[in-house]
Amino acid sequence: MLEFGWRAMRQMSSGVIRRLINYWPPFLFSGIRVIAVTDDWRRVEAELRLRWWNRNAVGTMFGGSLFAMTDPFYPLMLQHNLGRDYTVWTKSAAVEFLSPGRTVARVSFLLSAEVLNEIRAATEVGEKCEPEFSGVISDPEGRPIAKVYLTLHVRRSLTANHARSARRPPPEKIQDRAAV
């Protein structure tokens, strides 16, 4: 039986998921390619090669393709590292174009253990957390093409919070001193 969704993704290697992402239509038809995903999903690298189908009117890389190559990765990395109990989505994004992309554009995304711990702590009781991430898209020589700023929305699901509180012993009752 063919299985889709979270359980199936957890059983696949990062290499298999990387290849599947490369066939995702927005990436496939833009020329975006994921070139590396670490097994722990804490580092992802992507690239975009200039082709006739992703050129803009002046012959350089289309800005929408540059942005598209950055959009899903931090949410995917967080979702994979935090687990099913969390909802993660991109709340806002901004792109600052610095120079025209004329050959290849590359970007790396890194997710530190400190950031994961901060998000877990901030969302422990069901509160939302809105971490901010950024990335620099550069050419093969390391010259920046664009900077991307992402604000994500992260929240631990209430059912996960209820399940955790059900495992905790109830707090001791405080006696009413007026009744004594």
Image (tube, rainbow, N blue to C red):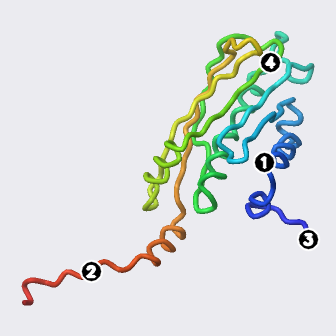
**Residue at 66% in and 19% down:** 146
**Badge 3 element:** loop
Is 26 left or right of 112, judged from the image as shown? right
**Do labels 2 and 4 touch, CB within 8 Å?**
no
Q: Alpha-carbon distance for marks 2 and 1?
A: 46 Å
Marker disc for residue 141:
none
Residue wearing tag 4: 61
Residue wearing tag 1: 14
Amino acid type at image mark 2: Glu
Which one is closest to the eye, mark 2 or mark 1? 1
Q: In the image, is residue 3 above or below residue 145?
A: below
Marker disc for residue 1:
3
Q: Quadrant of the C terminus?
A: bottom left
Within 10 Å of disc 3 (Cα), the crowding (few <14, some 14-19, many 20+) is few
Residue wearing tag 2: 172
Q: Alpha-carbon distance for marks 3 and 4?
A: 41 Å
Amino acid type at image mark 4: Met
**Residue at 69% in and 15% down:** 145
**Residue at 85% in and 22% down:** 49
Amino acid type at image mark 3: Met
Amino acid type at image mark 1: Ser
